[in-house]
Image (cartoon, rainbow, N blue to C red):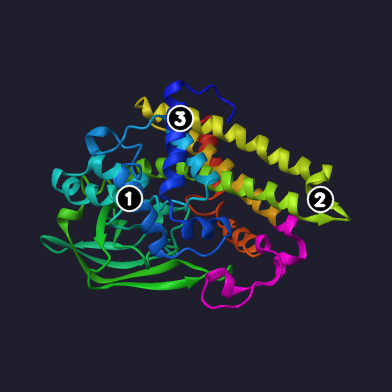
Amino acid sequence: MDLNLSAEERAFEAEVRDFIARELPQDIREKVRLDRHLERDDYMRWQKILGRKGWFTGAWPREHGGQAWSAMQTIIFNRIAGEMHCPELQVFGPAMVGPVIYTFGTPEQKAEHLPAIRDSSVWWCQGYSEPGAGSDLAALQTAAEDGGDHYIVNGQKIWTSFAHHADWMFCLVRTGREAKRQQGISFLLIDMKTPGVEVQPIRMMDGRHYLNAVFFNDARVPKRNLIGEEGRGWTYAKFLLEHERVENANLRFITQELQKLRRVASEVRSDGRRLADDLSFMAEVSAVEVQFKALEIGLLRTLSDMHAGAPAGPGKSSFIKIRGTEIAQRITELLVQASGPDALRYQPGPLFGHNDDALIGPAHALGPVASYLFCRAMTIYGGSTEVQKNIMAKHALGL
């Protein structure tokens, strides 16, 4: 971003660069740089390093163990993390359920869960979507029946990212059948080791396993794991979704992919000249870079409002979500285009590191198609683009 940073912000920028250069494990850096598959241990090793520094939850208020990062510090950290090939952070804990717990949770819930989120010793997943309740989340049917000092949970969640890695799930369940569907929803914290919780993998067309179906069969969840009041889960869910959609700006990912795109364009030759010298192609690259700069400004404004105590608001967070996901998709399209026929080969051995198969073709062509296929889902998960536009029309334009 071409902004005038203060002396304090420049010092923070230098500190972030020095820390990442010194602390990011080289094997993880190379996996990210080369678009290789990351395992649970790869994410957790880096997140624990950040946790020891206090940076895994850098944006949290100091009273909850955070660093109280400013909006600009948050953007600086994510931009540099992208430039220096850091893994995408698993934000279900620090950016989603963490703020819900420290805002609405009991003292006991805060004491139990916030330290483990801060140091990344616990991996969380999100139990929202169901087979009949995706963008229309209020249609969810997973039920939590009163069992005395516990709930008996039955139902199914789907498209649950990294549930096979997760230790805990924050989950929306139906505890009532009121006329207004949102009034019967509650927010539960569920230990994934609970008997009756079953995780089934969903293998995606990019060949990777990151999504799952989760089944609940008479799973007994203590009532002490209820966040806030029974039947007010929709309120807490909306609070969380505003944070999630801001995370969907994909700042780190876009920064990394743009850097990669320019590197590939300088290496690939088309009709005897570098792709970087093709004015038509580079005009497409410049156009998406301009869109990204506008997104960064919008994100800075939104984060500044949130740090000042104002909610992100559904209109602002929806704008960030739409633009962030569409820009990420466009960059992956350009990377596939830049890699050309070399990107068509599916080489699971080198991609997943499961054997010693030799790489065929240039290294930069191994990952773009997998990233492109994954990014097709970006404009669906977290609330589809069509739904986000409806939210903006209602809240921003009053339609």
Q: Nearer the viewer, mark 3 or mark 1?
A: 3
**Three-letter residue code for mark 2:** Arg
291 shown above or below 309? below
Report if residue 16 is visible in the image. yes
Residue 367 lies, in percent from the top left, at 62, 62
**Residue sticking out furthest to the front:** 22
Disc 2 versus disc 1: nearer the observer: 2
Quarter of the image containing the C terminus?
top right
Q: Which residue is mark 2?
A: 274
Residue 101, percent from left and from top? 25, 45
User: Residue 179 shows which numbered tag?
Assistant: 1
Q: Is residue 95 left or right of residue 148?
A: right
Q: CA distance from mark 3 to mark 1?
A: 44 Å
* Residue 126 visible to the viewer: no
Distance between the alpha carbons at the discs numbered 3 and 2:
36 Å
| Magenta-highlighted residues | 336-365
Dot 3 or dot 2: first in sequence order is 3
Q: Is residue 338 magenta?
A: yes
The residue where tag 3 is placed is 72
Query: Residue, x 28% and y 57% (percent of image)?
Result: 122
Quote the CA–CA distance across marks 2 and 1: 63 Å
Q: Quadrant of residue 222?
A: bottom left
Which amino acid, by three-letter code, is at mark 1?
Ala
**Which is nearer the eye, 230 or 345?**
345
Does label 2 or label 1 sit earlier along the sequence?
1
Name which residue lies at 57% across and 35% down.
Answer: 295
Camera-side mark, 3 or 2: 2
Marks 3 & 1, CB-CB < 8 Å contact: no
Amino acid type, mark 3: Met
